[in-house]
Image: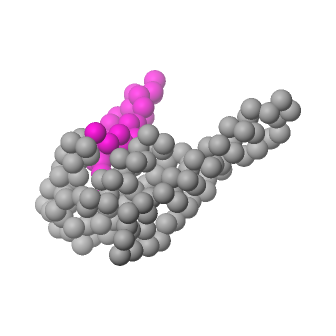
Amino acid sequence: MLLTIVDTPGFGDAVDNSNCWQPLIDYIDSKSEDYLNAESRVNRRQMPNSRVQCCLYFIAPSGHELKPLDIEFMKRLHEKVNIIPLIAKADTLIPEECQQFKKQIMKEIQEHKIKIYDFPEIDDEEENKLAKKVKDCLPLAVVS
């Protein structure tokens, strides 16, 4: 699979963030539509799969709760693409704060009925153990 990473620097930094997610949703929709159109042709041509498969959603390390913008964006996006929540700059939190923040984020995700990526079960027992371990750590805390 060809991996393309699209960064969205400055997302949510505007004074008025109403509908700031629309360009991202339009981009996701257009990539899906392009692929569907290519697949629907009578004479299919080889086209790379450029659909957006996953959104690594970076959450600011506030240590308190999700911002309303985070909740609204994930609610609008979760039906279109797999979301994997990540706590950015996790090194700014002490381990206890990080664990509490993870619990708070997952609580809010469940309260707002936001679907996040559910690691699938497969036949390999070792792979399932690893997938369960990763799933239990969500949101992942990253330092980059």
Res 21 visible: yes
Res 51 visible: no
What percent of the width, then of the height, locates residue 141?
30, 59
Q: In the rendered structure, which segment of residues is drawn in magenta?
A: 113-141
What percent of the width, then of the height, locates residue 140?
32, 54
In the picture, residue 89 is in which quadrant? bottom left
Residue at image coords 26%, 66%: 61
Numbered-mark total = 0
Question: Of all residues shown, which one is farthest toward the top?
Answer: 123
Query: According to the image, what is the colour scheme of the structure?
Result: one colour
Please say whether residue 122 is one of the residues in the magenta stretch: yes
Above or below: residue 137 compared with residue 120: below
Above or below: residue 11 compared with residue 5: below
Judge by depth and name the residue closer to the eye, 123 or 54. 54
Please say whether residue 62 is one of the residues in the magenta stretch: no
Q: Quadrant of the C terminus?
A: bottom left
Judge by depth and name the residue closer to the eye, 5 or 27. 27
Residue at image coords 32%, 37%: 132
Residue at image coords 61%, 53%: 3
Above or below: residue 42 compared with residue 20: above
What percent of the width, then of the height, locates residue 1?
64, 45
Judge by depth and name the residue closer to the eye, 72 or 49. 72
What percent of the width, then of the height, locates residue 93?
20, 68
Q: Is residue 121 left or right of residue 69?
A: right
Question: Of all residues shown, which one is farthest toward the right?
Answer: 43
In the picture, residue 79 is in which quadrant? top left
Residue at image coords 38%, 32%: 128
